[in-house]
């Protein structure tokens, strides 16, 4: 019997959830949501040196853009950026949704212990998007969040002059 991609993703997420909940008492709703997202989307290609946290938040950003889920994308915003995450999320989805549903490469720049610059390359649409992710204090554990302060659609599509058109052109080093 041949399963559809959707059913395979559902079974993969269920299996991941079963395995992880059986092995850890610390597995929570966020972990379950992440496992489901991981099983439901095309793998993210990676260039550079992400941390576990910067990679995880970047994957979630791409997944929510691909799914058109503005509420969940805005939920990933840094608490200091509460002025415009909903509008920024809508802009990112409108601008990059089609590309996010295909092959995406994330290039991680510089050292990422507390913050990291990430450039997303949407291969199907040949678009490029630069984001910043950072650690914020979250009670008993640190959490990674994304900076979302682009309420203007034109600003959301702007490619900064230093951003290369192809992954790896700068060796994952931001020019200073």
Image: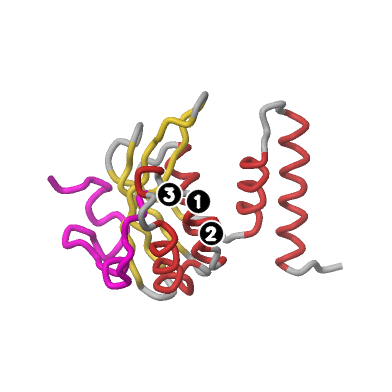
- Residue that badge 1 annotates: 75
- Residue that badge 3 annotates: 77
Cα–Cα gap, marks 2 and 3: 10 Å
Residue ranking furthest to the front: 83
Q: Is residue 149 magenta?
A: yes
In the displayed structure, 15 sits above or below 125; it is above
Near-viewer residue (155 or 34): 155
Q: Position of residue 19 (x, y in %)?
A: 75, 37
- Disc 3 on helix, strand or loop? loop
The answer to whether mark 2 and mark 1 are in CB contact below 8 A is yes
Region in magenta: 147-176
Q: How is the image coloured?
A: secondary structure
Q: Position of residue 172 (x, y in %)?
A: 27, 47
Could you tell whether 162 is left or right of 49 in the image? left
In the displayed structure, 86 sits above or below 59; it is below
Circle 2 packing at 10 Å, graded few (<14), some (14-19), many (20+), is few
Cα–Cα gap, marks 3 and 1: 6 Å
Q: Residue, x 54% and y 56% (percent of image)?
A: 72
Circle 1 packing at 10 Å, graded few (<14), some (14-19), many (20+), is some
The answer to whether mark 3 and mark 1 are in CB contact below 8 A is yes
- Disc 1 on helix, strand or loop? helix
- Residue that badge 2 annotates: 71
In the displayed structure, 102 sits above or below 30; it is below
- Disc 2 on helix, strand or loop? helix
Could you tell whether 105 is left or right of 151 in the image? right
């Amino acid at each position: 019997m041949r399963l559809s991609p959707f059913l395979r993703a559902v079974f993969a997420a269920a299996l991941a959830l079963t395995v992880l909940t059986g092995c850890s008492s610390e597995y929570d709703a966020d972990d379950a949501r992440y496992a489901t997202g991981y099983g439901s989307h095309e793998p993210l290609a990676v260039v550079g040196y992400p941390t576990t946290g910067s990679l995880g938040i970047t994957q979630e950003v791409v997944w929510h853009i691909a799914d058109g889920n503005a509420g969940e994308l805005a939920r990933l915003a840094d608490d200091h950026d509460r002025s415009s995450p909903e509008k920024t999320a809508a802009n990112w989805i409108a601008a990059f949704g089609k590309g996010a549903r295909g092959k995406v490469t994330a290039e991680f720049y510089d050292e990422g212990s507390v913050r990291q610059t990430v450039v997303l390359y949407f291969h199907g649409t040949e678009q490029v998007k630069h984001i910043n992710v950072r650690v914020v204090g979250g009670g008993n554990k640190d959490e990674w969040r994304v900076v979302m302060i682009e309420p203007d659609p034109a600003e959301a599509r702007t490619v900064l002059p230093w951003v290369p058109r192809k992954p790896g052109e700068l060796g994952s080093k931001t020019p200073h």
